[in-house]
Amino acid sequence: MWKSSRKVRKGIIAAVIVSLLLIAGLCIRSLTVGRQGGSSIEISRILDLTSERNDVVYDHVIVSGEDRFSSLVAVPLSCWYDISDNSSVLLPLLVGDSEPAARFVSLTGRNAPLIPGPGKYSSSLEAARAAFSSPAGAILVPEGDEGYDLALMAVPMASYLNIPVVVLEDALDPDEVERDLMGLGISYVIAVSGKAVDFARKMRFDRVEIRDAGDAILDTAEVVRDRFGRLDYVTMTNPGDTRKEPVVRTTVQEESVDLRSLLIDTSTRDVDLIGESVTTHLIDVPEGVFDLVVEVNFTDVKAYPMDPLKNAFDVEPISFMTLTDHQGRLAGYSPSFSVGGGSN
């Protein structure tokens, strides 16, 4: 009787131990899976997700002219599109504490500004909480030149997708950021630059990875096409227009040419009757970042034996310049211009 009872007890103990091991195994597995990062996803996966905003109690946004990241944070605070009801909002975004900004506020009767703090993590998170009750996602922009330069192309998506911009600082802990973003209620992040991608991989959110300008352009184009049905035009700008690089060295290459030609311009083509009206010059362009300026200067213009006709009709020379690379591909073109009486 005792032996039989003891065998039963062993069976019960063994069953309990096995059950505990199974439960522990499930818990450990669950914890392990939970700490893995989210997946890298395409921008198309998030286009149908919508955000919820708090009641808008401000009528314009003012950011510091001394902090470039605060302007990025302010983009979705001043302009956004809501696909849930096909509505959009556009509020004035003023940069800097200046007389023109104060004059604008006075003339338009606006008296409820939203003033985000410096473009750092805490202030960008505070701005997100002030504007959103439940954002679908967030754009993560790391501090520094790389993050800022790429964000200039990517941050407009924050308005189209109706999500906040959060600035990442170098000393931040991914676990802390994950808790804060979960508190906002987001389900995905758009990581701008390789630095932000590496950071986002340590969190459990699905992420859209924007590593370079090509990613930013293609993803923005897809978002715009989804929101508006088509993409009719693309505006291209020169980064040098906004930030001039220091000039390290200047090299001047001068060439003179004596063009002797008589050309007839017909409706279909130009015909050189005498000489050649086109001249080609090679320009030695070094590697690296440079600003290439090509100028044409007519020092003397003669139309012999047609000088009387030239003077009677005030004929002026016209120049067309085409710049190609060493493989013959078009790199630049200058439209025709008048040089004002033969000299410039």
Image (cartoon, helix red, strand yellow):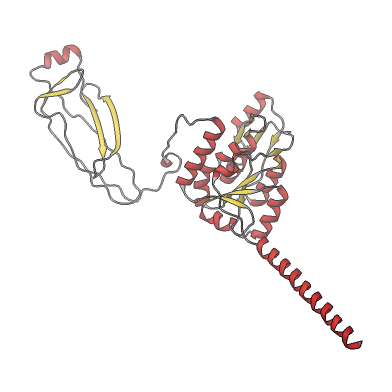
Provide residue 263's location: percent of width, then percent of height.
13, 22
Residue 182 visible in the picture = yes
Residue 273 lies in what quarter of the image?
top left
Residue depicted at x 22% and y 31%: 297
Residue 100 lies in what quarter of the image?
top right
Whether residue 14 sits left or right of residue 263 in the image: it is: right
Q: Nearer the viewer, residue 158 or 308?
A: 158
Provide residue 20's location: percent of width, then percent of height.
78, 72
Up the image or down, 200 lies above or below 300; here it is below
Residue 96 visible in the picture = no
Provide residue 168's location: percent of width, then percent of height.
60, 53
Whether residue 340 sits left or right of residue 212 in the image: it is: left
Up the image or down, 307 lies above or below 170; here it is above
Position of the C terminus, as image quadrant, is top left
Up the image or down, 222 lies above or below 269; here it is below
Residue depicted at x 58% and y 51%: 207
